[in-house]
Image: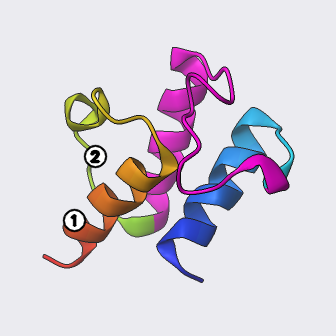
Amino acid sequence: MSVFEKVKETIVNNIKVDPDKITLDTDLKKDLHADSIDAVQVIMDLEDEYGIEIDVDKLQDDSTVRGIVNYIETLIKK
């Protein structure tokens, strides 16, 4: 499963949105109306899935699915 697919699955499981609404350009806050609790749960689940620690400050400026995917890909390549 690609990082995008895993992020999408995690978002669907936590925010309960239609998977067809999630693209790389989807913004968690603006498009999915995710609140901070939703976002934290998504991040925590992704940290558990990949065994990484995500610095949420790095995601503050880009809350798109693409931003999350790119950040995770950078962490797992290390």
Task: Give whichever of discs 1 and 2 has the lower sequence position.
Answer: 2
Alpha carbon distance from label 1 to label 2: 8 Å
Return the x and y of residue 63 as percentages of the image width and height. Answer: 42, 35
Residue nearer the viewer, 40 or 8: 8
The residue at 28%/33% (across/down) is: 56
The residue at 13%/76% (across/down) is: 78
**22 lies left or right of 37:** right
Identify the element where label 2 is drawn: loop
Q: Which mark is residue 54?
A: 2
Neighbourhood count class around disc 2 (C-alpha, 10 Å): few under 14, some 14–19, many 20 upward: some
Identify the element where label 1 is drawn: helix
Return the x and y of residue 69 as percentages of the image width and height. Answer: 41, 60
Quarter where residue 33 is shown: top right
Return the x and y of residue 5 as percentages of the image width and height. Answer: 62, 70
Bounds of the magenta segment = 20-49
Question: Seen from this angle, which residue lies furthest right?
Answer: 18
Q: The residue under label 2 is which amino acid type? A: Ile
